Image: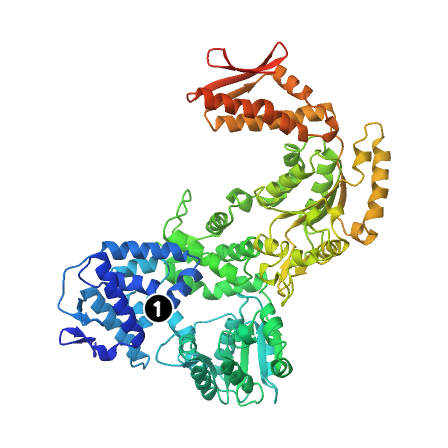
Amino acid sequence: MTTTVRSRGTLNPKLVGKELVSVLNAAAARMHGFGHTVLTPEILLLTFVESPHANAHHILRQLVVGRGHQWERFAREVVSLARERTVPDVEFDWIADNNRRVPLSDELLIVLDEALTLARAREEVYIGTEHVLVGMTDRRVAVARLLEQYGITSHAAQDTLAVFSVARDTTTTDYVALAKQGEITPVYFRESLLHDLISLLTLKTNRHIILVGAAGVGKRTLVYSLALLMAEGKGPSGLKSLVVINEQALLDNALTALQSGLRRAKGGILFVPHIARFFGGLRADFPEAVGKELQKAFLDDEVVVIGTATESEYTERLQPNAVISERAHVLRVEPTTLEETIAILDVIRPRIAADYGVRIADEGLREAAKLASRYLTDTPLPVSAVHLLHRTCATLHLGLHSGVAQRRDAAGNETVDAEDVMLTVSQLTGIPVKRLGADERARYANMVEHLRQRIVGQDEAVLAVSRAVKMARAGLKDPRRPIGSFLFLGPTGVGKTELTKALAEFLFGSEGAMIVLDMTEFQDENAVSRLIGAPPGYVGYEEGGQLTDKVARMPYAVVLFDEAEKAHPRVLDVLLQVMEEGRLTDGRGRVVSFAETVIILTSNIGGQYLSDPQLPVAVAREAAQEELKRHFRAEFLNRLSEIVFFNRLDEVALRKVLDLLLEKEIVLAAEHAITLEISEAARVWLLKQNDRPEWGARPLRRIIERYIRERLADWMLREGPASSAIVRVDVQLDQLVFLAGQGEAAKQTS
């Protein structure tokens, strides 16, 4: 090493940048707070974690979160390590702001020496926190083991340092120059988008471009691709550089940084990620003068500006700006297809595998793309699949996939395969692994039998729903539309909601995979804005839409619109769009897909006919149909997969429902170490208490709660039964009694 950070027993202050000085002072205070006498890499790493404006903090977050780890968990582990590790005093130290000498451990000196080597290799004068972080990945330093567990290797940290240009001592970075030096890692080329991008950049005037798309679809990667092509001389004619302004420089002095970026980008391209930050008046992130300076660049062609924005950012902040909307072209970047995503994962596979010390099988790539597309749709492809692959590799590397035998190749590396990916998705979503990996054909073939286990007396309804869902899953539907759209008609208490819950459990693994909206709350004309969110500038804009926000967060769900007949006609128009197009655009301009949802509307329209035991079934349904046509437009009814009629429950069906409900009570009692036995006589007695059979199963729940649950609770509180108690519910002298222990009466009820 030709240069040392040490100078006559102290750290050479001339080599340390302002940001690192500040962090070292904070680390010294942290050291004293722990009661330690020596500053170690662990304490300095903790200070990075606690310093959100430090470059090292940004790199750490990018790598930790980008690889699918929890930032909070990482921070806790760093705190624990910094608190526990102590070393003896050494001869070199750091002079803090208060002129106190802070001893530095030998390992920290190794880190600082490596940081200086990196800074000099990059032709930078000062050591920054980002260089020190890379130094911490040196295998001679103990803290490197913790960083490696989170995928923060020397290779990964330097890649991030190069690609995201966080170097403190330079205001701007030229991606083309980086590409020529081999400092941009390979990326997947989206040929069609690149062709469109280069075509627009080849124009003689008004060549500015706004890349519009959701976060994670690959807008920034598209720009990296362009830089790689330009480095090979295959880019747009006459443009030699692609410059980006460093985020830290923008935060320190936005106007100066922008002016520097515009000067360096003359004759080339200035890339401005999240360009909407510069505009929007009072809502802009930077002073007005900065936005005006950037706006000037759109008025000439000395510098070509490429910015990125989401759809809502473009609509709200950029489109209203006449200079930008008239002089910049919009190029929309859509999420990648499944095949494109697999190809992207294949390109980055070597880097991810090296970061975690694993081998990634082809089937692991395919499964990551497929399951991310289906189950992790809160973020789009390809980023959801990339995060999933990182998370799976990290989990396998740390040996956290319990119950699965580790698979190693000849070189001794663990192999990430489809099963590992399924386990990770199961951990992230709560969906059972067996459901993720089950044979879909076999499962759907048994759908009717599965639903019948829970739904009593409604075989026709079960068959109708199963038929439509199975056709959809077989691919015999428009892939853009929901899995199915059903209108459940019938009197109260006959199983409409229970079938909805059963569907959610069958399709998505949990009854919790339900979004329920009570349409009695959407009876006025303005209710639409509550469903999809108010547009910009209107009251309630920040709250989002009750329907669109929930589906965006939980795209694999059964969406239940209860008492649909009470909704305002404009709300029904929204539902019509969902059933027809399978998507909605919310008030912020975000497109929300309903392609993996099941839409269920319930209604009591015609319930008086369907619950009348004197009317033949055919007559009752015809009357209900006529009333239905008077309330809903034919266009709306024609978009439904099925109109499902529910029968009134007869005495036999009610008894079966009672037995199912009592089984749940028995299970609930067992959770409290009580064996609950309910005799046949008691069951007959309970059924006789139902004086409103026309209300279906609903009275039965109240009867069980009153005569079983409440009185069992009273007995438990009064007697404080020992574990493994046996309670028998029976009838004596036409009264319900509770018998416990050796047959003595614990409670008697009438």
Task: Tell which of 631 and 353 is nearer to you.
Answer: 631
Q: Whole-percent x and y of residue 386?
A: 48, 61
Can you see residue 139? no
Image quarter of residue 17: bottom left
Tell me the residue at 83%/42% (across/down). 625
Tell me the residue at 38%/69% (across/down). 53
User: Residue most toward the top?
Assistant: 733
Can you see residue 627? yes
Image quarter of residue 24: bottom left
Q: Is residue 161 above or below residue 544?
A: below
In the rendered view, does 379 fall on the left or right side of 113?
right
In the rendered view, does 445 fall on the left or right side of 21?
right
In the rendered view, does 272 fall on the left or right side of 46?
right
Image quarter of residue 538: bottom right
Q: Is residue 405 above or below residue 73?
A: above
**Image label count:** 1
Circle 1: residue type: Ala
Q: Whole-percent x and y of residue 4?
A: 20, 76
Tell me the residue at 64%/33% (across/down). 454
Q: Whole-percent x and y of residue 548?
A: 63, 56
**Mark 1, other Cα within 10 Å: few <14 / some 14–19 / many ≥20:** many
Q: Whole-percent x and y of residue 736?
A: 59, 16
Mark 1 secondary-structure assignment: helix
User: Residue most toward the front?
Assistant: 539
Q: Which residue is mark 1?
A: 56
